[in-house]
Amino acid sequence: MISFKDFSRFQFFLFFVFLFPAAPANSDNAEILTPPAPLVAAISYILLDFNTGKVLAENNADAKVAPASLTKIMTVYVVFRELGNGHLHLEDNATISKKAWQTTGSRMFIEVNNQVKVGDLLKGVIIQSGNDASVALAEHVAGNELTFADMMNQHAKRLGMTNSHFLNADGLPNPDHYTTARDLAILTRALIKEFPDYYRWFSEKEFTFNKITQQNRNKLLWRDATVDGVKTGFTDDAGYCLVASALRDNMRLISVVMGTKSVNARANENQNLLNYGFRFFETHRLYQGKTSLSETRIWKGDSKNLQLGLAEDLFVTIPRRHYNDLKAVITIDKNITAPVREGQKLGSVNVALKDEVLANQDLIALKTVDKGSLFQRLYDEALLVVDKQNGK
């Protein structure tokens, strides 16, 4: 096992100062004190960090509740996936059925038998919360809404949304149509991560279609310039709900509030949660993915050295003012022998705060190293025998 103290003195100095600036003398004894989350007048809620998935506050986050129009986050996620795999294009035209046209509730005001571009329908769902647009997309993608709901449930299962079940694309009430605050946070995190280019539509404040302009119902888009999404919802059984996300100083938080009493309440409660998270926590990228973190000896290969790193960026979310208390340990496998494939696990990186492990990621080979020549293999074998005899 290799920790910071196993580096050469010069490597140690550069590495440690770059990653973790010098800590105050008594930092090891500094107590971690974080105030509790604000009281939230809602049936359930959750607040988490986008990059790490760390939950900063929650209550009844696994309670199954009616999602209302928050359903449409999954609707557009499914459509985004179809766009991503090339099965669908934004310029494709969808023919509007009578069922989609006569769907009740909030509407985009599409007309039966007209053809509407997929891109416009998506904006009609995201910005205008159109139930008619949601059904039209479902029918265009899957042929009918029930088949589309099956696709929604398949994606929910794949994402780990263990307490969700969808029966429609618009969120109109049904006893067997439900989700949870935690599942919606999981879904929103996946949507933002996988589709950053499409996600920008969630920040648009209005959209005009068929000469009718409608405003986004997310009041936080007007109140807080750092908020850039996500979706509101309301039915009598669901109450007033909101999934919100904000980005401040490279830290993104996602808040989900279910079942408040009014439009203003859902905005206020989400704002309070977001402010709490940004005020008392901070997120840091400690290591960049696909970048050399360490170099190690590789035996019997066509190269003597092997660069090791992480498959993706490593982030941690911690209480504010405790960055200097972070401790990292790098573990590298002994006697690594060629051949080694790019991406092969050859160790780990462990990051902890006090006694709490915050992250543990595989240390992988950043390139492939093939077997060396017969002479190189025999020479390295001799060196390994000598090292073994010397107890190394």
Image (tube, helix red, strand yellow):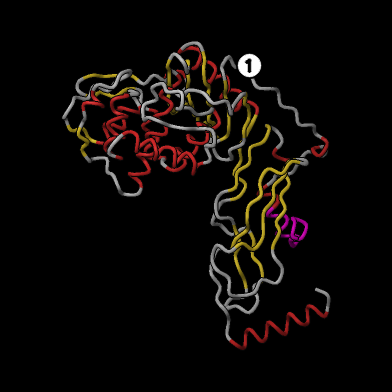
Q: Which of 110 and 176 is in front in this view?
A: 176
> What amino acid type should be assigned to the residue bearing mark 1?
Leu
Residue 183 position (above or below residue 384): above
Is residue 17 positioned above or below 375 on the image?
A: above
Q: Can residue 379 be seen in this view?
A: yes
Say left or right for 20 vs 128.
Answer: right
Label 1 neighbour load within 10 Å: few <14, some 14-19, many 20+ = few
Residue at the image position 61 percent from the left and 24 percent from the top: 60
Residues in magenta? 1-15
Residue 317: image quadrant is top right
Q: In which quarter of the image is the C terminus?
A: bottom right
For the residue pair 350 and 158, the one nearer the viewer reads as 158
Image position, residue 27 (x, y; %): 79, 38
Would you say 77 lies left or right of 38 here? left
Circle 1 residue: 39
Residue at x 32% of width, y 24% of height: 131
Q: Nearer the viewer, residue 345 or 175?
A: 175
Q: Which quadrant: the N terminus? A: bottom right
Give the residue at the far left of this rendering.
113
Q: Does the magenta stretch include residue 57?
A: no
Asked where in the image residue 129 lies, by quadrant, the reply is top left
- Against 321, residue 236 (above or below) is above
Residue occupying the point 46% across, 18% down: 223
SS class, disc 1: loop
